[in-house]
Image (cartoon, grey):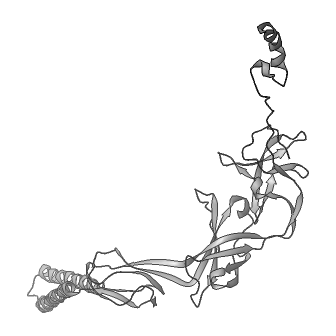
Amino acid sequence: MCKHITRLLPFCLLHPIVFMACGNYVEQEPAHPPKVSVAEVKLTTLYGGLSYSAKITEKSRVEISFMSSGRVNNVFVKEGNYIKAGDLLASIDPFKYKYELDAAYAEQEKAQDLLDRYAKLYAKGSLPEKDYVNAKLQLQQAEATAKTAQLNMANTKVAAPSTGIITACIEKGTYVSPGAPAFTVINTDQVYANISVPEGEIGRISVGQACKVIIPTVDKELPATITIVNPEADAASSTYTVKIMLNNPARKLLPGMLANVSISTSGPRNVIAIPSGALIKGINGNNFVYTLTPDNKAQRADVQVGEHTDSTVVITSGLRPGSRVITAGQQSLNEGDPVSL
């Protein structure tokens, strides 16, 4: 019996069906290629226009501080108040500064009296010139000291430098130092809609270009123009900040609101656009897709991308019409892998 099994072993090893007499092995079926979806690359007509998500920001933000140190004894505004340039915001205890001012005035008066007396004596030739000159210098020093004391006294109050809304406010009783922020004022009479534009699209945007801003929160659709194109790209995202100024007389548009911006560009043009899901980003940040060879194998194609729409991305280089791009099932593929449809 063993001799028969020995003679059958070579046959068992070569035949796709392994007999029970060879050790009860089961037939090994070949692995099936992964199933993918494909789309033919075609030229499509894209009408001039770019769309972005935007965020509303204030036109300006100002930090206001006291120029003198002291304890806050009065606060005349609160968060949310609309203020105008020149409005009084708060004050600190002026006692110390009033004392210094009174003392400075007294010294100035004393120096003026001395100079008046010396001037008469000097005119009669009864006073040396150096004493008269010293008296004049004493008056000048006293006047300078008085002006400094006046300024310190005036700085016990802080007024709004511009029109806007109070968003941060110091509390009464707080001790403040010169330059420490006491109030924050934002100007929302005009606001910006800020968008981030990819490198591949920034060349199609310029100051003065017509656009439309839609703010769903307040149900507004506003015509506008591009106001600012920042020429420096963000280091992390490689995008450029573009700002659209909007008039906001009723102050209904608030910082932080979300918006959508549509920018008019050129007329209709023929482009290659593929489903966004087909695009893969490599570990070094480059974009690529997998195309299908005639014998149904995956072939990598590095591509350059343009603008994005809701479900597609424009390919500016790397693909040609007529090729087949894998749109689903490509994430685990490697170059040359066989696939099934």
Task: Decide: is 218 above or below 264.
Answer: below
226 left or right of 92 in image: right
Residue 188 pos. (x, y %): 54, 83
The image quarter containing residue 271 is: bottom right
The reply, left or right, for residue 114 in relation to residue 294 is: left
Residue drawn at point x = 82 percent, y = 42 percent:
339
From the viewer's perspective, is 237 left or right of 22?
left
Q: From this viewpoint, is residue 84 visible? A: no
- Asked if 277 appears above or below 178 in the picture, the reply is above
Residue 209 sits above or below residue 338 on the image = below
Q: Residue at x 75, y 69 (%)?
A: 50
Image quadrant holding the N terminus, namely: top right
Give the x, y percent position of residue 270. Answer: 88, 62
Splitting the image into 4 quarters, where does residue 18 fall? Answer: top right
Extreme-left residue of the structure: 126
Q: Residue furthest top?
A: 3
Q: Is there any visible trace of residue 55 in the rendered image?
A: yes
- Give the camera-side residue of 258 and 294: 294
Counting every numbered tag in the picture gives 0
Residue 193 percent across, percent down from the top left? 62, 76
Residue 202: image x %, image y %? 70, 63
